[in-house]
Image (spheres, helix red, strand yellow):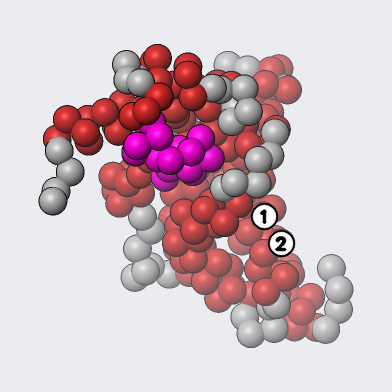
Amino acid sequence: MPPRKDGQKTKDRILEAACELFAVKGFHAATVGEISQKAACNIAAINYHFGSKARLYTETWRYAHACGHELYESIQPTLDLPIDQRLRAHIFFLLNLLSNEKELKSLHLLHEREFLSPTGLVDDLWRELRDPLREGFLEVIQSILGEKGSEEDVNFCEVMIVNLCRSILKHNRRQNPEYFGDLEITPEFLETMADTLTCFSLAGITAVQERRREGTGC
């Protein structure tokens, strides 16, 4: 029997309320009672649809991630580009994800809350959601490094590029207002940032490649 439309509407309201409260308060502080009140339903409805607070939390992450589906599709890098342009496309894609404060706002806040107060409930789920979006990025880095580039090299290069993007878009805007306080994230800025980070990243990956080719450490 297909789910009733009113039941799906209730489920969606619960997920929307949970997104907001888990993002603001975190898993431990947000209560099922608060979520039911905000969703205009009773606790029994939450138990019926999700079974437990922990299951609601994981499904909230799925829901928040799914809100960016159209964004992922619209800016997903293509494969038929030269390797340096593919690297830029992936960096531009990453910048768009990190700077998105519309479709992905709840997901960003959930991620920050989980980082500050880990629950362990979404570790495997986060990898499941994240990995399809990063596979092409890892392939590009591996292609630049060549066959002597190890999996560790690839992961290190990826982490460094991701953290550079995140640092400028998130942390430095708060911690270094003299440089980034008035920064306006516009499409033009993201294009410029993608160009600069691509040059910087390509030089770094190439340097690692040369060291591996020579058989020396970095």
Residue 41 vs residue 89: left or right? left
In this rendering, is residue 134 above or below 152?
above
Q: Is residue 163 magenta?
A: no
Outermost front residue: 44
- Residue of label 1: 159
Q: How many marks?
A: 2
- Residue of label 2: 156
Q: Secondary structure at mark 1?
A: helix
Image quadrant occupied by the C terminus:
bottom right
Q: CA distance from mark 2 to mark 1?
A: 5 Å
Image coords of residue 103 (percent x, y) = 37, 33
**Span of residues in magenta:** 46-62
Give the residue displayed 56% in from the left and 22% down from the top.
30
- Determine contact: label 2, label 1, CB under 8 Å: yes
In this rendering, is residue 32 above or below 66?
above
Image coords of residue 154 (percent x, y) = 65, 68
Give the residue displayed 63% in from the left and 28% down from the top.
28
On residue 112, which mark appears?
Answer: none
Comparing 193 with 99, the one in front is 99
Image coords of residue 147 (percent x, y) = 64, 85
Give the residue displayed 80% in from the left and 83% down from the top.
214
Magenta part mainly helix, strand or loop? helix
Which amino acid does the dot numbered 1 rest on?
Answer: Val
